Image (cartoon, rainbow, N blue to C red):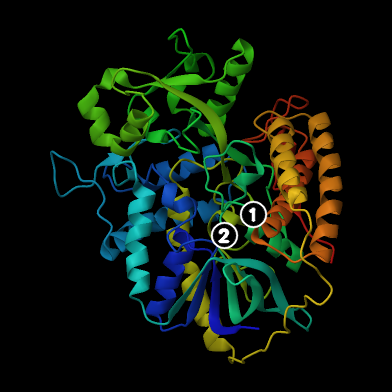
Amino acid sequence: MVAHQTQVAIVGSGLAGLSLALRLSDQGIDCIVLTKSALASGSSLWAQGGIAAVLDPKDSFESHIQDTLAAGAGLCDEQTVRTVVEQAPNAIDWLMQAGVHFDLKQSIPDQLHLAREGGHAHRRVAHVADTTGQAVIKTLEEQLLAAERVTVLENYTAVDLTTGVGNPPRITGLYALNVAAGQVETVSADIVVLATGGASKAYLYTSNPDTSTGDGIAMAWRAGCSVSNMEFVQFHPTCLFHPHAGSFLISEAVRGEGGILVLPDGSAFMNAHDSRAELASRDIVARAIDYEMKKGGLDCVYLDISHKGRDHITQHFPAIYERCQTLGIDMAHDPVPVVPAAHYTCGGITTNLQGRTELDGLYALGENSDAGFHGANRLASNSLLECVVFSKRAADDIARALDRQRHTEIDLPPWDESKVTDPDELVVISHNWEELRHFMWDYVGIVRTSRRLQRAANRLQLLNEEIRDFYSNFTISQDLLELRNLVLVSELIVRCAAQRKESRGLHYTLDYPSADPSLCQNTTLTPRL
């Protein structure tokens, strides 16, 4: 068996993982980055809008803080919000020093062009056209490949964390499946950081890539970490509706630049749902679209920005314009068909302001974590910001932790495959995967009821039993590992949703359609080991 040794093992290569690896390398700390696909992959790569930060003299930290708290519907941790918002300008500076070229104003070439998105009172979103994530990730990838002390393991899927004997136990590393070789390898580490992204692939329709299978959340739960606020799944209001579009997103910034949501007859409808109309927060816009689609029996609604003209559209949204063109949609003349899609997991592994979990030696960053920044609903363009700010805070904390403890190389026990065989029927995995995504969409989607949640819980119990049996008796594969994790995370989402007897933020239930001030508290689950 292949055995890897390192000071810090980082699982995931989105913005949180890449930023952390670069910061650790700068401090002379050895680390291994494990990624399920290529290095530049994951949801961060697909982020269109940008990164929110107070960069305009007319804006203020307090305004950004209040916008974030308002979107979070009472469940944000104010200290966390204040910390991240106040460190946001430094995060933008760090990215620019790394080589990210954010768009500049045409009229004032030395000033950043700032976009405005739903829920923001000011223009404060730094961006690179409409492909910010791609620009940021590609830039950091180049930096990382040239960095010292960083080893990248591509096409590795983490299986489970390992802990040492003690009270309390401490992290010792993890097992990871080398997909190309088809074998499980060990990774011994003083510190493990989970930065695996969210779990939106639990749903039938999602804007996220296939890697968003909740791996970090599931592994942390099995190792004994608490999770919080898993009921708050953000559905992006405007995913392109077309049989050949895949999971292509129509950025929030399109509405920020004047795009109007309309019905097939061309009539606008958002004013009937919120006074902010198209600039309302994502949860409100997604529910409004869902309501209008169900009311009218519609397959989709439309987003119309044609009144802005071709030059404006191609300048601000070149990638979106080009993608629509390939599908026969001219944004300068045609409204774009859109539907909501699962987009962001607001809850996750419970952490502190340094990204530390309850398990000694384990950190969690980015979408798979919950430090209280997003609360019941993430404000647009705050996610990439969280990744960059927390990567610095975690890197500094990890450096201090490594200084305090003595490095000891640990030989993890080999992965035991002596009692398993190759599976004779893989249809079990594919069938269960499809069933999971369908009933999660139908029962645990934008609008929920207690009965729907119970139906989902019943089906999850059966799926858990089948997968547990399959996992125990057959050789593991990436598909099996991802399905195992998705079913567990789906169960956590349903359990949290069933506990919340009110509607708040992204959790909307017909049985309790109003928010209850007495229930304005986090939903936290702790595993029984």
Q: Residue at x 32, y 32 (%)?
A: 321
Residue 405 position, x and y percent, is 59, 88
Q: Which corner quadrant of the image does residue 235 belong to?
A: top right
Answer left or right for 320 relative to 395. Answer: left
Would you call the spot at circle 2 few (<14 residues within 10 Å), some (14-19), or many (20 or more)?
many
Q: Amino acid at mark 2?
A: Thr
Is residue 370 in view from this perspective? no
Is residue 128 in view from this perspective? yes
Which residue is at the front of the view, 43 or 119?
A: 43
Q: Quadrant of the C terminus?
A: bottom right
SS under mark 1: loop
Residue 180 position, x and y percent, is 57, 68
Which residue is at the front of the view, 380 or 33?
A: 33
Q: Earlier in the sequence, mark 2 or mark 1?
A: 2
Q: Residue at x 58, y 15 (%)?
A: 298
Residue of label 1: 214
Residue of label 2: 196
Answer left or right for 424 relative to 294. Answer: right
Answer left or right for 216 relative to 34. Answer: right
Q: Which corner quadrant of the image does residue 316 belong to?
A: top left
Q: Amino acid at mark 1?
A: Gly
Which residue is at the front of the view, 31 or 228?
A: 31
Query: Can you say whether 428 is above or below 226 in the image?
Result: above
Which residue is at the front of the view, 175 or 81?
A: 175
Residue 107 position, x and y percent, is 13, 38
Marks 2 and 1 in Cβ contact (< 8 Å): yes
Query: Can you say whether 508 is above or below 523 in the image?
Result: above
- Image mark for residue 242: none
